[in-house]
Image (spheres, rainbow, N blue to C red):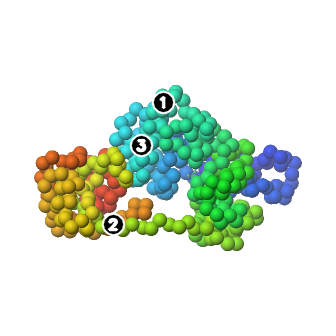
Amino acid sequence: MEPRTRPGDVYPGEEGKSTKKRQTRSAAHRLIDFFDERGRDLPWRHTRDPYAIWISEVMLQQTQVRTVLPRYLSFLETFPNVESLAAAHVDRVLAQWSGLGYYRRARQLHAAAREIVARGAFPNTAADILTLPGIGPYTAAAVASIAFDEQVPVLDGNVERVLSRFLALAEDPKRSEVRRILLRQAAQMLTPERPGDGNQALMELGATICRPAQPSCDLCPLRSDCRGWQEPHRYPRPRQRRAVERLEMAIAVVEHVGRLLFFRRSEDAEIMPGLWELPMVESISAGKDLAARLATAYGGVWETGPVIANLRHTITFRDLRLEVRSACWSETIPKAESRFATPAEAKNFATSSIVGKVLGALGRDEG
Ligand code: ADE
């Protein structure tokens, strides 16, 4: 990565100090050194374009860097600026979001792009960015600090963990009093010259050094000031996890001359709204047979055949066991929008992540 200040540079207030004195650099400056010397070289770190930074921050919120990397470049190729995103039909945006999950983010991105174009310019302060639809304090602060050098701290999951350990704070970082303390500390970790890099350095530290399990405290630039490094696992105290819900589902694969039957989920669905899916119903309970349940959910007349694959899939707190069956469907009055498509064609519309998994298991992930 191309640092904006070189590691050996003398920082304001340190002019005239000997090298040894400079080794007693503030935690904020040690963080910046860490970022320059050991930060990963990631494409969104080479730009000051608020639009590109915004896209990367939204993608990175619930998705890992290695999954985001190819999707980020391809998204920016398709929608290189806020105008092209605003002008696109939302279905094209959703299709470009394929593989990233949490599609609500893509809908909100699209709505905010339209709002930015309507306002005439990308807002350039965290307070203004926060007024856009679907943008929260994290994204507003990340974009304002990285693109516009505004001195605003960010708190994401990584930063919460790093600073809870730094301050030896066991309390839940989501509580508002704790959040206030963490934000104050995060602000102290920023240098006036490079607030965006300071924020990214804290996130980077959490992702690569101050990891949830087995942090590498011996490599940490903050260790000399860290109150929690000898017992990092105590901070913050683990939250009570929501119980995992197990669901047994049946998926019906209806094939007609190489094309498979897809239905569109309702826009009001609690999970995966508006995405295309292979027909899927709960397979146990209710007492009705599968064909009857498929008819209730999707309309038409169904016949189900043998099991052709068994899979597991996790969506947040739901652990799905999926029994995939071949099936026949004759359309009467369908209850949802439907289409037949080849697996290659299905890549061009927004499908639930289960679709890719099923096609992979059936050896049909061609194209
Ligand atoms: N996680 C989310 N955004 C990030 C960024 N800009 N740098 C490091 N980690 C991140």
Label 2, on which residue? Answer: 247
Q: Which amino acid type corresponds to the residue marked 1 in the rendered image?
A: Val
Q: Is residue 321 left or right of residue 171?
A: left
Location of residue 177 (image quadrant): bottom right
State the residue in front, 283 or 204.
283
Secondary structure state at the residue bearing disc 3: helix
**Residue 99 on image: x %, y %:** 39, 53
Lower sequence index among marks 3 and 1: 3
Secondary structure state at the residue bearing disc 2: strand
Give the farthest residue toward the front.
286
Q: CA distance from mark 2 to mark 1?
A: 43 Å
Lower sequence index among marks 2 and 1: 1
Q: Is residue 192 left or right of residue 129?
A: right
Q: Which amino acid type corresponds to the residue marked 2 in the rendered image?
A: Leu
Q: CA distance from mark 2 to mark 3?
A: 27 Å
Location of residue 254 (image quadrant): bottom left
For the point 59% across and 65% down, the residue is 211
Q: Which amino acid type corresponds to the residue marked 3 in the rendered image?
A: Arg
Q: Which mark is residue 107?
A: 3
Lower sequence index among marks 2 and 3: 3
- Residue 220 visible in the shown view: no
Q: CA distance from mark 3 to mark 1?
A: 16 Å
Q: Is 65 placed above or below 274 here?
A: below
Within 10 Å of disc 2 (Cα), the crowding (few <14, some 14-19, many 20+) is some
Secondary structure state at the residue bearing disc 1: helix
For the point 64% across and 46% down, the residue is 196
